[in-house]
Every structure is written in C-alpha cells, then in structure tokens.
Amino acid sequence: MRCPGQDSRYWKHDAIFDIKCPDCGTEIEFFKDQTTCKCKGCGKQVINPKMDFGCASYCQYAEQCMGELPPELLANRDDFLKDRVALKMKMHFRKDFKNVGQATKVSRFAAKIAPEEGANPAIVLCAAYLHNIGAKLAEKSETPVTSEDLEKEAVRLSSEIMEGLRAKPELTEQVLAILDHVFHPGQDENLDFKCVNDSINIYQMQIANKEEPFTQTGFDERLRNNFMTDSGRELAKKSIIIN
C-alpha cells in the first residue's frame, strides 16, 4: 500500500504548483510528491517547500517512498527525530506534568547551549528530553531508589524509544552513553555530555534557589564547580536571579 500523501489518486487541485527559485527567482513547477526540482535558471536543486518530511525521521521506507533524499533533508533528519523523542517522553509521563516540565525545561536550556558550544543538537536534545525518563521507577519501588537506578532505567526505556523510532544506531549509542551516567559526570566527558550536564544543573539550581535563595558566593561556587561549559555558565547567570 502506498502512502496516501504520495498517491496521486488522493491528489486535489493544488497537487501541482509553482514557486520562485530562492536563488535566481525563476519559476519552478513542482508536483506535490517531488522532493526536489532542478531550477532551469541557475541549476540549483530546490527542496519542495510544501512537502512534509517529518516521517523521514522514523519511517524505514523513507528513501523508497520519496526517492533519493536531498542532502539538506538528510542533514535535518536528526532534527525531526528529537521532536518525535519529545512526543514519546510526553506520552510516557502522560499527566505527570512535573516530570514533563522538567524534561521540557532542561531541553530548552540544552537547545541554547548546544549551538553555542558546537555540540551535536540531535544527541544533546534527545538526551535532554530523556534524562529523567526513568523517574517513575521511584514511584513503583518499595525500597529507596538511587540515582544509579534511575540512570539504568532511563537507558532501558530510552533504548526502547530510540529503537522504536528507528534512530540511527550511532546516534542512539551516543544518547544512551550520556544517560548511562548523566547524574555521575566524570572528568573527561565529551562536549555533548557537558551540554546536557549544564542544562540539568540550571534546572536544578532554579528549583533550589526557589526553596532557599542562593547567596552570590554560593552561586558563584556552583558555577565554578558544577558547570562544564562557558555557555552553560552564562545561561545560568541569565536564568537564575540572585537577590
């Protein structure tokens, strides 16, 4: 069975349309199922602006369905993936708005730190969304749960989520490597881990500051000891108000 969005039997009057080449302004005619079209004016391969490529991040038949995907799209497939991971995280927690809020806020910090540091946004964002995915373990367990237990549960659940979304193995491996000791950072962590670490620290410091406001000295000490990136420190200064 062919995807209805690509099957001409389901097409309407707007299935063929014209756009202007973003480089030279020449009119380009697109069929809705074309991923790219070569401009007759300048020769540039132009991506179909009306095509929804979201499914390309998880569908195992993406290449067969859409043809040879353009390099620009292939570069963005990981970006589509992080949005799917965010959705899976919300589905997992359902009405547990506290944990959804934590993952969302940490991810927002990560989205600002990663590009400043030159880290891989897809790895950092996926790990940020999933860093506390094991939190429900504490609710189910009759005995005290350690941070190591939460890390193991996060790795287990995240592995299932990433596999279910058919993420690239190398990307999944790097995300799981971060989650494996996300609450126990070492001395020689890679850049992606550092960005996630600092994002979590900002969130935790915001919570702690509300419960017992920091002194400037205590705040500065945390910045020196707990943060791994300059961008993380700067964002912490902007995100946490010290009276």
Image (spheres, helix red, strand yellow):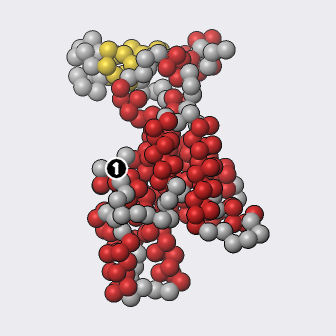
User: Looking at the rendering, which quadrant does residue 102 occupy?
Assistant: bottom right
Tell me, yes or no, if residue 26 can be seen here.
no
- How many other residues sit within 10 Å of disc 1, few (<14), some (14-19) or many (≥20)? some
Give the amino acid type for the residue marked by disc 1 in the picture. Answer: Ala
Residue 186, image x, y percentages: 40, 63
For the point 49% across and 43% down, which residue is it? 173
Q: Choose top left, top right, bottom left or bottom right for residue 215.
A: bottom left
Q: Which residue is mark 1?
A: 119
Q: Is residue 30 above or below residue 54?
A: above
Looking at the image, is 230 positioned above or below residue 190?
A: below
- Where residue 26 sits: x, y (%)? 27, 18
| Residue 169 in picture, x, y percent from top left | 50, 36
> Is 29 placed left or right of 65 in the picture?
left
Using residue 42 as the reference point, say whether residue 50 is left or right of it: right
Residue drawn at (45%, 45%), measured in percent from left and top?
Answer: 174
Residue at 23% across / 22% down in the picture? Answer: 24
Q: Quadrant of the N terminus?
A: top right
Asked whether 143 or 84 is in front, the reply is 143
Give coordinates of residue 9: x percent, y percent: 63, 11
- Residue at coordinates 34% horizontally, 86% vertically from top-left? 216
Secondary structure found at label 1:
loop
For the residue pair 31 and 170, the one nearer the viewer reads as: 170
Left or right: 35 in relation to 141:
left
**Quarter occupied by the C terminus:** bottom left
Vertical position of residue 56 compared to residue 142: above or below: above
